Image (spheres, rainbow, N blue to C red):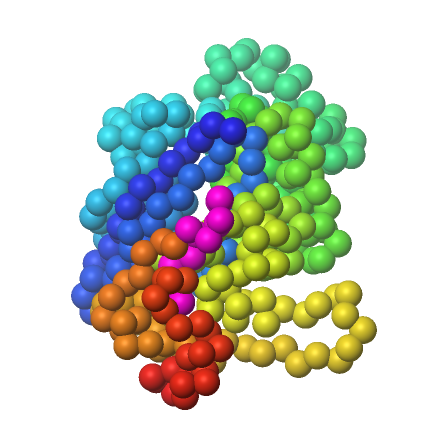
Amino acid sequence: MSKLLEVKNLKVNFSTYGGEVKAVRDVSFHINESEILAIVGESGSGKSVTVQTIMGLLPKKVSKIKSGTIHYKGKDLLKLKRSELRKLKGSKISMVFQDPMTSLNPTMRIGTQIAEGLIIHHNLSKREAKIQALEMIKLVGIPNPEQRYNQYPHEFSGGMRQRVMIAIALACKPELLIADEPTTALDVTIQAQVLNLMIDLKDKMNTSIILITHDLGVVAETAERVAVMYAGVIVETGTVNQIFKEPKHPYTWGLMESIPDMYSDQKERLIPIEGSPPDLFAPPKGCPFVMRCKYAMEICESKMPGDYEISPNHTAKCWLNDEQSPSAEEVIALGGAMYE
Ligand code: SF4
């Protein structure tokens, strides 16, 4: 599989009255062609800022890309002219946002909004664009396309509006779709329908998808590979199997313990991750998870761990994976974390 997009050493800061927030801290990852990659993490972990940087959507006045590259098919998106990036967005790279009501134009008919991109990016006539827009409405499973084409966003339910957003994003047949919490505002049944629709479209159109979510259930059902983000850093990456069956980072262990096992017939207590994420005005010098980790050692506080390769495709940023480190059990036997 070849890489479609590769982010390397990305650092993004925000200027606020209180100082500089280090929102994304040396993030590197890639997505292959025709693959679904989930970026998972709690609110404020930097996942949305990362994809907004890819899309060139950061507010210019308060944000600063301190370093890094974002290569899309060999071109660094951060070095493209605005006009070149605009051309790429919408035609090759599209985005679906969390809240369709604020992303759709309430004064424009749905059909016109879907056809607009086709007219701009593919130079289609209005008539041709309408034919393709109707096909997209059908493809995303909205019944009565002819009638729905002429309706306004407020005439659609939440799930249907999200389908419209997906139709707009996919109308120009992008190679990469970025979906930022696309199902968070939907109820569980509609959520499943929208996720199935995205998987289906990926299979039919070979679209790669970066799925941003905090919901591990969504990750398990949809993604092929996962990047776990914490406090602006990717702390673990791997295939869905590797992350769910053999996680190698204490934060990922914590995430796994905090989701119910629907196949277990035992009554089990869910264990929340104690504490809160670090202050990103002054993040820890070493591991970002150090203050919440029950295995923290002295080195964790002073030095950021590297990405340890556990197996092909699987890396974890944790000192416990160093060959000279005691195991997690040994740390506990020695009295547990230095911060407890
Ligand atoms: Fe971070 Fe150390 Fe805990 Fe690993 S053991 S997650 S490096 S604090």
In depth, the one of 317 and 289 nearer the eye is: 317
Question: Which segment is the magenta one?
Answer: 309-320
The residue at the point 64 percent across, 46 percent down is 222
The residue at the point 42 percent across, 51 percent down is 309
Q: Residue furthest front?
A: 324
- Determine if the magenta segment contains residue 312: yes
Q: Describe residue 16's horizontal placement relative to residue 295 as left or right.
A: left
Total numbered circles: 0
The residue at the point 53 percent across, 20 percent down is 118
Tell me where residue 22 appears, x and y as whole percent.
26, 59
In depth, the one of 99 and 306 nearer the eye is: 306
| Res 213 seen here | yes
Q: Describe residue 134's horizontal placement relative to residue 336 as left or right.
A: right
Quadrant of the drawing holding the C terminus: bottom left
Quadrant in the picture for residue 149? top right
Q: Residue furthest right?
A: 265
Q: Is residue 156 above or below residue 83?
A: below
| Res 113 seen here | no
Q: Is residue 220 above or below residue 84?
A: below
